[in-house]
Image: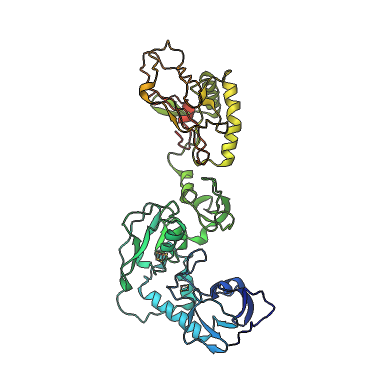
Amino acid sequence: MSAQPVNPNLPPDHVTISIDGVEMAVPKGSMIIQAADKAGIPIPRFCYHEKLPIAANCRMCLVDTEIGGRPAPKPSPACATPVMDGMKVFTRNDKALKAQRNVMEFLLINHPLDCPICDQGGECELQDLSLGYGRSVSRFVERKRVVPDEDLGPLVATEMTRCIQCTRCVRFTAEIAGTYELGGMQRGENLQIGTYDGQPLMTELSGNVIDVCPVGALTNKVYRFKARPWELIARPSLGYHDALGSNLFHHVRRGELLRSVPRDNEAVNECWLSDRDRYAHEGLTADDRATVPLIRDGDGFREASWDEALDMAVRILRESAGDALGVLAHPATSNEEGTLLARAWPAVSAAATSTTASASLTSPMAPRPSRLPCRWPRSSRPMPSSSSAPTCGMKCRCCTSACARRPSAGQRSTWSIRWTSTSPSASRPSTSCRRRSWPRPWPAWIWAMPCGLR
Ligand code: SF4
Ligand code: FES
């Protein structure tokens, strides 16, 4: 083979190859399957996934290659064979097709023929490819192997007999989730995929193993047996349960939201989706979903109209002006929500109270004490003993703000003032003053919030 580049006009980090007679320039070091994908030339695959490291263990992507006019002695896996200058690749000649069909026959030896009852039916990569490469009759008369199911928790359903051991799920937990939870146990025909410790998946990205699994071994437990993919209409949307704003599709059937799946966006969530965003739609139809305002009534809640609830909120805000007013922000609050809260809260607190004596009215965005963290030891607390004590008056050691809390008559005060200002590097911008062992100081409307915030 000549050391001269086939096309001298190409940049030095590119090479010229031809796939099925289509000549193209591709970056050095890329794999044949990547070049083919770019050119829109289909090559069957199961274990290859563009976001996961290459494993090359299914062999479905075998292609015929020729370098310098010399054919390769045997088919090469397109996902693990780097391109070379002057390489010719044949994905559809007799040699390649025969190799692909033979691999498919081997894959189907142990795969059960349960497509009609498999939840992956209609969106199964094995089902699709077996239509093109599979035989209608199996030559294997031996018993198929049966693999016991794994309990991967409440979100991911398993049918491990269907597993073709592509290890996409294993590589996902190792390389993307970073939790190394799944692995291949035993070897050869006895290889089984499961968690190393036999425990359910703990990663908050566990739902993605459903997407990467090319067969029906890992399916969505929540959506199980509810619909077939061709019944669903995909509505593009955004995830709203964290500050990422993942792109997703809601799959809807006749107005009923049945599942959420990721929508590719390289700048945001790539092709992944967190479990919160994937399964949060269940809350829409949850029995305990608060669809009307609830007002605390004794130990329970009673339903109320919006007018009544808003009137009550206004009244409570007015009556509780001072230290009893506070605002709770969830640590997963997005930047936008935090900013809105910071803008809104001073206005609310100013409307509710005419003084700024309460230290707990500090806006999350207001300047925070610099010394961290400060907690009053119980022993050094001055305890107001009766309702005659107007307010605590105790000063925080860090910020010297005075505590304006007022204990009820006859009640032994067991409260503490605690400034938990976070360091500049911490992710929670919360400055809170919390009372312990105290009758719930929060107004009823906070306890009735549908998001469950407490
Ligand atoms: S469970 Fe699915 S993704 Fe995991 S190895 Fe088996 S076939 Fe591949
Ligand atoms: S896709 Fe290439 S070996 Fe599996």
Left or right position of 173 against 190: right
Where is residue 221 drawn, in percent x and y? 40, 55
**What's the colour scheme?**
rainbow
Left or right position of 216 against 82: left
Quadrant hosting residue 377:
top left
* Residue occupying the far bottom of the picture: 70
Q: Is residue 108 visible?
A: yes
Where is residue 55 drawn, in percent x and y? 44, 70
Total count of labels: 0
* Residue occupying the far top of the picture: 388
Quadrant hosting residue 301:
top left
Left or right position of 290 against 268: left
Judge whether 17 appears above or below 180 on screen.
below
Point 47% across, 48% down: residue: 276
Q: Quadrant of the N terminus?
A: bottom right
**Residue 351 or residue 97, whichever sits in front:** 351
Left or right position of 62 against 27: left
Point 48% across, 30% down: residue: 432
* Residue occupying the far right of the picture: 9
Judge whether 68 appears above or below 202 on screen.
below
Where is residue 335 drawn, in percent x and y? 57, 41
Q: Is residue 308 visible?
A: no
Q: Quadrant of the C terminus?
A: top left
Point 70% across, 78% down: residue: 9
Where is residue 310 drawn, in percent x and y? 55, 26
